[in-house]
Image (cartoon, rainbow, N blue to C red):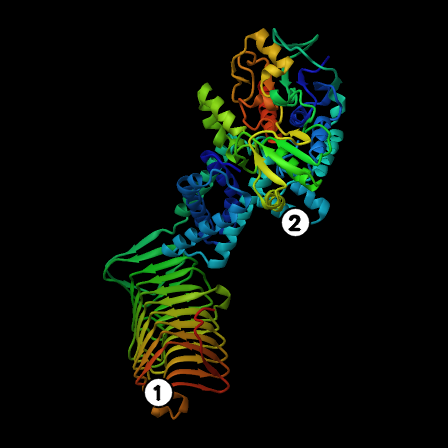
Amino acid sequence: MSAQVAVVGSGLASFTAYQTLRRALEPGEIAVFGTDADPAAAWRVRAAAIRQRQMRSESDGHCLATTFPGLAFGSVLRRRSLRPLLESGLDRYHPTVEEFLSHVERLRERSRWDESLVLRRVERVRAVDGGFDLEGDRFRHVLLAPGHPGLNVPEELRDDPRVVHSYEPHDYAPTVTVVGAGLAAATEWLNALAAGAEVVSVRRRETVRRPLNVPRHYFSRRGLAGFHRLPPRERVERLRTLTAPSYPAGDHWDEPLERPKAEGRFRVEASLNGSAQVICATGFLRGYRHDPLLARLVAEHDLETAEEWLVLDPDSTVPGLSDASRTLALAGAPAQWAFPAADTLAGARYVAHRFLRRIESCRTR
Amino acid sequence: MSYTLRGRAESRLAALLPVLLAACVLAGVLHRWWPVELVALMAAVGLVLDLEVWHRLLPYQPAWATVPLAAVELGVLMAIVYGFGLHAPLWPAVALFGAGWLSSVVLAQAGLPLLRLGYAEDGGELGRLGGVAAVAVVLALAGSAATYVVRLPPVVNLSTGVHQGPLVITQREVLQGEPGAVVRGGIVVAHDDVEIKNVTVVGGANGITVDGIRGTVLDGVTVQGARLDGIHVRDAGVIVRNCTVDMLGNRLGQGIDISFNMGKGMSMVEGCTIVGGMVGITTHSSMTEIVRNRVSRTTGQAISVAEMSMGSAMDNQIRGALGVGLNCDDQSMCMFAHNTVVGTRPDRASGDPTRRGIGVLASFYSEADLWENRLAANPVPAGAVTSSTLKTTSRTDW
């Protein structure tokens, strides 16, 4: 294989990184290992399962290498209206799922993603002299974007026949309990109510309302500089706070709940009751231990960890395995140690920019 | 966008760079320094607000916030401009600020993110580019300042004593009179950008003649015994301030005559004292502001805005004029506000009914707007003749 740069994973984080890499590299110089040619395949299923119509992200929630032009700009050209741009200026523009998926589709074609794609699952990455071995293929620079390790269903509900995860395709029973307090849970309350169900929300904590996954200043060096300076224990605590489930404030979330609340069709309870259906809007399994590739990487190279997180440098590279001649970096949810919102498109872009910087500064690339 | 402090400063300076370059070009075209001064001030105000206010107040700055922030910065900027008397015209200054603001919005939202990968996540920091932008701004301002200093006209000191004239000035210079410096026989200004300070001129056909040039400043000059006009300006832009013109005994001459200079922009006569002569201050086909002067004992009119002039006379004190105090004549448009016209005397010898001691007169298709003038002890406080109008208005601007 002639490529010097490999990306493991073929989801949106990988795809976003690929767009940045393409600014400096040709498709033949990048190998993307994954099991699905469509970078939005996994995300598409989940969005469809919760009937998501709008993105939580804003205009810059896209896969391009630079924030401009954002999706609002493209929308202005398509709709021939300045409204998306004005909404973007007010932080109120949220692209539709359809717009986002078309954007991915266009970009896939334009960036020649398929030319770099190797349809193969990589289960082991080993550091070797001057690079990394990916089950027989050697690369100097490797970005791991394995995606979420699986859906999280609380232990006590795993054998309950009424249970379905929110990210699995499902319909709604006449009585539904939704477990969780994040965006998926809030979406499911509205979905189930719209389907005529009686809804019970079960959650361990009060809901956090904020526009994006984490406070906005954690998307830039302004918030990250302090975060990176935290000692490990405090950083773990901060990460737990920052990554707690949340969903945006706004009337379009609250108003549809008011009448059902008054009618008793929507209520909050502390534990499960006798609902016919239990929807677990409890997100994904968290932590490197749930991902076989990462768990093996940590074990074989004795990498530093902090509870469920793999310890990374601020540029999301793996300390000890990255130096002037080679780079191993993480993208997506496993990169939260470097960037708390790593599981967003902005997070993927953050990692990609730094990964490219490392590659460009490597004289022997 | 969540700016770091460094990111704010670097983004601001980078955005200011094209505006500063445009201001330098504009300064060259206009032969005025206010565009560069204004941009330097914009940089200073912006950086101080960044350091002291915006960074602390705004951990995250949404795009819409640039509008109120710009309004505050514009307010502070204009307060300084007017507070410190920088001579920047209002609307061009606002337009330059607007261009700067627009440039910063376009660059922050589109230009800089395209130019630098990771612009947003780096909090607006530009790396080497930021340093280059800062150095470029400093160099441009330093270069402008150096050019300003180098281009300052040489100062020529006129020593105490009497110097035989007429003195003809044929180069850019500041003619600085030492106490008691007198030129006998008049001064002729024959070059652009000449400033004459604290010089007494005695005699001459005209005391000081300024003809066909720009940028003359007469500051603190004294003129006595001129045979024709005290200060005689033709087709030239001048600023005359704090002068004294003694025309007593000269029945036909004008104290200050500024004429036929419409194409040279606004001229100004401010803070002068004129005694005697036919007309104290007169303009013909001119745009001149006549402000805070004292004119007395004239034999024609004290102040006359005439012959298709557009001018204002404000806060002047006129005493003991023969015939007419303030005059707006011959298709002129005049604004007379806050003037005091006292004791105008009727010119019975002339037999002219328009000279029967009129405080304010509009004649021959002229329009005079009046506001809060104090007219006392004039046989006729105000009058309009030959298709002219006098109108009371509170609008004292043009």
Chain of the residue displaying label 2: A
Q: Amino acid at mark 1?
A: Gly
Numbered disc 1: secondary structure: loop
Residue position for label 2: A82
> In this orientation, which residue lies closer to the viewer: B232 or A46?
A46
Task: Quadrant for residue A254, please give it.
Answer: top right
Asked if residue A139 shows in the view, the reply is yes
Task: Quadrant for residue B306, please give it.
Answer: bottom left
> Residue B117's spot in the image, x, y percent?
59, 30
Give the left or right position of residue B231, taking residue A294 as reference.
left
Q: Disc number at residue B357?
A: 1
| Vertical position of residue A152 compared to residue B301: above or below | above
> Residue A72's spot in the image, x, y percent?
65, 42
Numbered disc 2: secondary structure: loop
Chain of the residue displaying label 1: B
Task: Quadrant for residue B190, please give it.
Answer: bottom left
> In this orientation, which residue lies closer to the viewer: B302 or A149?
A149
| Vertical position of residue B231 compared to residue B251: above or below | above
Q: Amino acid at mark 2?
A: Leu
